[in-house]
Amino acid sequence: MRIIIFGPPGAGKGTQASLISEEYDIPHLSTGNIFRSAIKNKTELGKEVKAILDAGDLVPDEKVVDLVEEELKNDKYEDGYILDGFPRTVVQAKAFDDLLKKNGETLTAFLQLQVPEQELIERILSRGEGRSDDTRDGVKKRLKVYREETEPVLEYYGEKGAVHKVDGTGSIEDIFNRITTILPDN
Ligand code: AMP
């Protein structure tokens, strides 16, 4: 099963992706987690992307696509995965499509988590994860970047008829139950 979980910052992608990963026994690939861990470990990649993450901007497409392509070569992704935070631009979505085609693979589901904007801001400011980009200005910037650069990805997948909308409000469990009714039985 190959799944994309999509939505604005604060929609709960990471939380739901972890639950999906456990329930369906597929690895969770979060580009944001990869970048944060690279920054924490002060790797070459971390040094390259730190200022970008702090500013709430997007890492250049080529770098992200190369990273995901390399990561997905790992055997653990052979039977599927859940992508969280990627693709985040139409360029990335097209590159990911090409990669699937090249490998003779298909996407099982594109899940769009829907949460009202005011709730996103409140959730991020109260989640207290200590992320350097979780400030009021940081959130506003990431929402702006989301609307301008990431939202068009919806249209791209919408044209393929692949988008499943999921109400992202309510308890974590309620949201997860909505997701499991969409995904095929494992
Ligand atoms: P996230 O944890 O998904 O909210 O990502 C945190 C930050 O990592 C984003 O604000 C971007 O700076 C960067 N990032 C994560 N995924 C991507 C991506 N697919 N393309 C570009 N930048 C990304």
Image (tube, grey):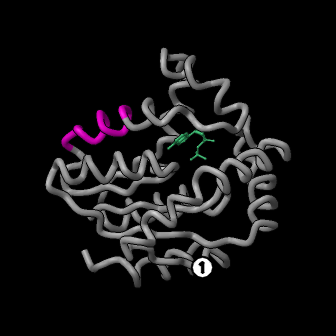
Q: Position of residue 140 (x, y in %)?
A: 80, 49
> Which picture quadrant has residue 152?
bottom right
Quadrant in which the N terminus appears: bottom left
Q: Is 65 left or right of 155, judged from the image as shown? A: left
Residue type of the residue flagged with mark 1: Asp
* Count of numbered circles in the view: 1
Q: Is residue 44 magenta?
A: no
- Is 81 placed above or below 44 here? below
Q: Residue at x 44, y 30 (%)?
A: 63
Q: Give the percent coordinates (x, y) of residue 150.
A: 58, 53
Quadrant of the frame with the C terminus: bottom left
Instruction: Name the residue: 44% across, 46% down.
Output: 91
Q: Which residue is mark 1?
A: 167
Q: Which residues are magenta?
A: 66-75
Please name whichever residue, 109 or 35, is drawn nearer the observer in this view of the structure. 109
Residue 53, how many percent across, how many down? 65, 33
In this rendering, position of residue 37 left or right of residue 23: right
For the view shown, which residue lies furthest in the left direction? 104
Could you say which is closer to the camera, residue 173 or residue 32?
32
Image quarter for ligand 1: top right
Dominant SS type (magenta): helix
| Residue 85 horizontal side relative to residue 67, left or right | right
Question: Which residue appears at 19% of the width and 42% of the height?
Answer: 75
Q: Residue at x 63, y 24 (%)?
A: 50
